DNA sequence: AATCAATGTTAACAATGTTTACATTTAAGC
DNA sequence: GCTTAAATGTAAACATTGTTAACATTGATT
């Protein structure tokens, strides 16, 4: 089938694909309709046959972005074959690594620039919303049930954990850490800090990760 | 002295004042030259007599913004009359409260939108840079010297603390917490978590804040 | 084959940041 | 005090951007 130059075939998905490719290397604010039309060889207004406006395209990017994010995060937290503490540890590293790998997408999902669009897409109080927050809360509640984690508000505990992850990720991708490359010691130290505040010390905690067993050794006391 | 309508008198400072007033209630991205010229009753291009371009005005806002931020944070961390742990506790609350009170300014200083300007203004590795980071590191080192805080890299520990503060502040002002008003219990819980990971348990810690003394009680152990 | 919905184009618009040429005011030097 | 230059402001024009309206082309349905 010979392609004609008029009807494109799958322009909508093409726009999205180009947009995601673009923000892999550029800030979202640099994504203009001209970028999209040049890359597809169409006119600047062609996009309006497939999206109500630019915001609608960005909104779909946010939606798909959260799906990608959740596809990475959820399996780590829910893996039935790993001890809970190990899952938390891996989730910490996975979260920050994802932000580092997709800094512009991460900012689009969790930053302020398109917050007005995000509010129609995700709901932090809906555990089925693809923010990873529901999975985090569930993991915390699992830890509470087995006596590993202090029995406090899982919502509060989830916010505390998320604050650390979001904060570190943001500081890294916005170049605030003062170092070229963030060391794996930093992740480990942050995780150790988080763990220290969450665990009960009343139940022996099982982990297959040597580092975690080192972290869990009780401190010398007064 | 009768004012003429041509020469304005102090247009540069006027622009800045209006800009800061504007972002008290609007996002920085809504701050246009028209907003400034309308408010001063000048033409849109008048600004170019006082700033090289819009970025130069934003850059000065960032500079002054960091001064304001530092004026709030530094005294809390260096107050010679408060025990170290109390200072950390108050700094936590002060940091988040400042972000909540100046959300758009906070995003301008610590967000990504104008990161290219910020890099010429502050240096995270320069303790005299008005980011508060130097003061935080010094406070940590003070705690290490007196045996309260684990003797690890103060830079790493500062990043860990800052991650929590920056993360929580960002989640709050970007409406990610899932609650109308963040409870003071959340701050306290986050602070308790941070403290648990930092302190040594080898030295008796003095605090005038009842909450902190509750936090510091050793957990029941296995 | 005729018709219509889907899809694309061109031209125009307003808003924005910016530059250039020009106008007005202030200040300095004589 | 007058002249002149520097400082400060304006008006007009430009490119870029998102957007809309009128028009053109294609493909599918009948």
Image (cartoon, coloured by chain):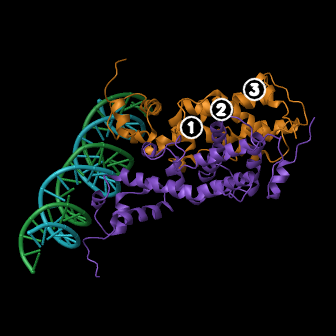
Chain colours: A orange, B purple, C cyan, D green
**Does B210 sit above or below residue D29?**
below
Asked if residue A53 shows in the view, the reply is no
Q: Position of residue A134 (x, y in %)?
A: 72, 40
* Marks 3 and 1 share the same chain: yes
Task: State the residue at coordinates (32%, 24%).
Answer: A4
Which residue is painted at 77% across and 44% down in the image? B148
Q: Dot 3, how many residues are within 10 Å of its Cα: few (below 14), some (14-19), or many (20+)?
A: few
Question: The numbered mark 1 sits on a residue in which chain?
Answer: A
Q: Which residue is mark 3?
A: A79
Q: Earlier in the sequence, mark 3 or mark 2?
A: 3
Q: Position of residue B115 (x, y in %)?
A: 46, 43
Mark 1 near mark 2, Cβ–Cβ under 8 Å? yes
Rounded to the nearest angstrom, the CA distance separating label 1 from label 2 is 11 Å
Q: Identify which residue, B213 or A169, lies in the foreground.
A: B213
Instruction: Left or right? Give the position of B40 relative to A66.
Output: left
Q: Nearer the viewer, residue D22 or A162?
A: A162
Question: CA gap, disc 3 to disc 2?
Answer: 25 Å
- Disc ID at residue A193: none
Q: Which mark is residue A177?
A: 1
Chain at tag 3? A
The numbered mark at residue A186 is 2
User: Is residue B25 toward the left or the right of residue B160 in the image?
Assistant: left
Q: For marks 3 and 1, give the CA distance.
A: 31 Å
Quadrant of the drawing holding the N terminus of chain B: bottom left
In the rendered image, residues at marks 1 and 2 fall on the same chain = yes
At numbered mark 3, what does the secondary structure look like: helix, strand or loop?
A: loop
| Residue A73 screen position, x and y as percent | 66, 31
Please state, as top left, top right, bottom left or bottom right, where the C terminus of chain B lies in the image. Answer: top right
Residue at the image point whose x is 72% and y is 36% from the top: B151
């Amino acid at each position: 089938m010979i392609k004609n130059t008029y009807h494109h075939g799958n322009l909508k998905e093409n726009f999205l694909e180009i947009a995601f490719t673009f923000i892999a290397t550029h800030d979202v604010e640099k994504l203009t309709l001209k970028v999209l039309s040049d890359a597809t060889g169409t006119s600047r207004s062609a996009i309006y046959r497939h999206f109500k406006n630019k915001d609608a395209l960005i909104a779909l990017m946010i939606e798909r972005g959260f799906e990608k994010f959740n596809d990475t995060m959820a399996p780590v937290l829910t893996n039935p074959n790993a001890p809970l503490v190990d899952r938390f540890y891996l989730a910490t590293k996975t979260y920050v690594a994802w932000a580092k790998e997709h800094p512009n997408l991460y900012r689009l999902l969790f930053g302020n620039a398109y917050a007005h669009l995000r509010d129609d897409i995700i709901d932090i109080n809906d555990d089925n919303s693809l923010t990873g927050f529901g999975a985090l809360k569930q993991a915390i509640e699992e830890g509470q049930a087995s006596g590993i984690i202090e029995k406090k508000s899982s919502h509060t505990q989830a916010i505390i954990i998320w604050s650390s992850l979001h904060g570190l990720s943001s500081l890294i991708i916005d170049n605030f850490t003062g170092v070229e490359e963030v060391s794996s010691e930093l992740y480990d130290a942050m995780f150790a800090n988080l763990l220290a505040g969450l665990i009960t010390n009343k139940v022996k905690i099982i982990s297959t990760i040597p580092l975690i067993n080192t972290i869990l050794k009780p401190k010398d006391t007064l």
